Image (cartoon, rainbow, N blue to C red):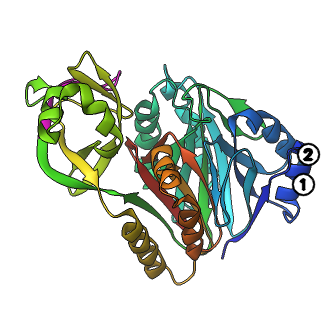
């Protein structure tokens, strides 16, 4: 059984917030932490000063999320004190040559006594649109050992400017940090919750720029015109429906959401995750998110006899929707039915090779 403790420090004084958040932490093997962009660098250093022998991995957040609700700028931390082994590293230059640093993943894997019941948790800076590149790099090695990956893109205060990730007191604005976590006495499962449903409108992406995440044509016609027709609105009103009608990339029986970003020249649409040429996509519409959350929690609880802890990555778009509709606090507290967890509102979510948006990812430890 994994022994964890969760702490949250809300004081405006950083040292006081640190003490408040970590007062019950005894001898952490690993600390996963989240806080706002403005306080991230200082909190990262203070945590390392207090726990120099622990692995510390964190991400800047739009909101910190735990069973007690949502906060902005608090220090939210989970201490793993027993029941795991873990090794961590950083992948640099993620917008250029992340493959140069793949040996760091191999070194971490090699230190594990076994790779059963092991997961890779990663946090990635997303300002360079490099999530897909880093995922394919890391997964090329993880797949050999059948180690699953989940994680999220760091966030700021909703400005989509500078974001940070941290490892062992060092802070990065163009890197990916990862930790391999092995559960010594139970399983680890990863879940993906989608609160949209398919419409009857499906397409093939026929002209794209995947690096810039732009779709120029669907079914060999201008992307924006095709979507506007299906939604029965003029193109100049299309952006008003962007948040409620993303595209879903169809992969087998699964669906990965690409959130709308910008309308380009009333013809093309840019997205927050890549859509490749000849990808099958479907137009999505909102589903009943309250019922879906109940179903997600029930499924997770049904899959485990005992849950030690969970880590939650919840997209900023979902978080903003829940805030707008007065559901955000209830959402956070309902997730508490799983037990102790820490989470953050992210700019993107990842599982395996896939980077996507408007989704919740949950890693659950037995």
Numbered label attached to residue 15 = 2
Q: Is 207 a magenta residue? A: yes
Classify mark 1: residues with Cα within 10 Å, few (<14), some (14-19) or many (20+): some
Q: Quadrant of the N terminus?
A: bottom right
Query: Is 128 left, or right, of 241 in this rendering?
Result: right
Residue bounds of the magenta highlight: 203-217
Pointers 2 and 1 in contact (CB under 8 A)? yes
| Residue at image mark 1 | 19
- Which secondary structure lies at badge 2? helix
Numbered label attached to residue 195 = none
In terms of image quadrants, where is residue 80?
bottom right
Seen from the viewer's position, the closer of residues 14 and 92 is 14
Residue 366 in the image: state x and y as whole percent: 57, 74
Seen from the viewer's position, the closer of residues 7 and 318 is 318
Seen from the viewer's position, the closer of residues 21 and 119 is 21
Query: Is 133 left, or right, of 225 in this rendering?
Result: right
- Residue drawn at x 12%, y 36% as measured from the top left: 204
In terms of image quadrants, where is residue 309?
bottom right
Image position of 33 with respect to 43: above or below? below
Residue 247 in the image: state x and y as whole percent: 26, 42
């Amino acid at each position: 059984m994994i022994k964890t403790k969760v702490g949250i420090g809300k004081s405006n004084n950083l040292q006081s917030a640190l003490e408040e958040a970590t007062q019950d932490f005894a001898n952490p093997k690993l600390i996963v932490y989240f806080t706002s962009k403005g306080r991230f660098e200082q909190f990262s250093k203070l945590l390392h000063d207090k726990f120099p022998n622990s692995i510390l991995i964190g991400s800047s957040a739009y909101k910190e999320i735990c069973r007690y609700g949502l906060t902005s700028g608090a220090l939210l931390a989970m201490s793993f004190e027993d029941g795991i082994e873990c090794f961590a590293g950083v992948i640099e230059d993620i917008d250029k040559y992340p493959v140069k640093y793949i040996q760091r993943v191999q070194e971490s894997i090699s230190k594990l006594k076994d790779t059963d019941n092991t997961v890779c948790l990663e946090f990635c800076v997303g300002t360079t649109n490099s999530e897909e590149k880093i995922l394919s790099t890391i997964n090329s090695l993880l797949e050999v050992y059948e180690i699953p990956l989940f994680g999220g893109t760091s966030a700021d205060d909703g400005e989509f400017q500078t974001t940070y990730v941290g490892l062992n007191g060092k802070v990065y604005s163009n890197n990916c940090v990862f930790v391999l976590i092995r559960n010594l006495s139970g399983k680890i499962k990863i879940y993906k919750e989608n609160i949209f449903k398919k419409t009857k409108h499906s397409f093939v992406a026929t002209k794209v720029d995947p690096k810039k995440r732009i779709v120029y044509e669907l079914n060999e016609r201008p992307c924006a015109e095709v979507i506007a027709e299906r939604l029965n609105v003029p193109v100049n009103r299309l952006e008003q429906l962007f948040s409620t009608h993303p595209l879903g990339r169809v992969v087998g029986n699964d669906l990965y959401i690409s959130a709308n970003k910008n309308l380009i020249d009333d013809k093309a649409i840019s997205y927050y995750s890549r859509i490749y040429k000849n990808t099958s996509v479907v137009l999505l519409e909102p589903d009943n998110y309250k019922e879906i959350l109940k179903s997600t929690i029930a499924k997770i609880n049904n899959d485990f006899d005992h849950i030690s802890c969970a880590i939650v990555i919840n997209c900023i778009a979902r978080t903003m929707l829940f805030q707008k509709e007065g559901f955000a606090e209830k959402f956070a507290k309902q997730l508490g039915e799983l037990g102790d967890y820490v989470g953050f509102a992210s700019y993107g979510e990842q599982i395996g090779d896939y980077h996507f948006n408007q989704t919740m990812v949950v890693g659950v430890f037995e």
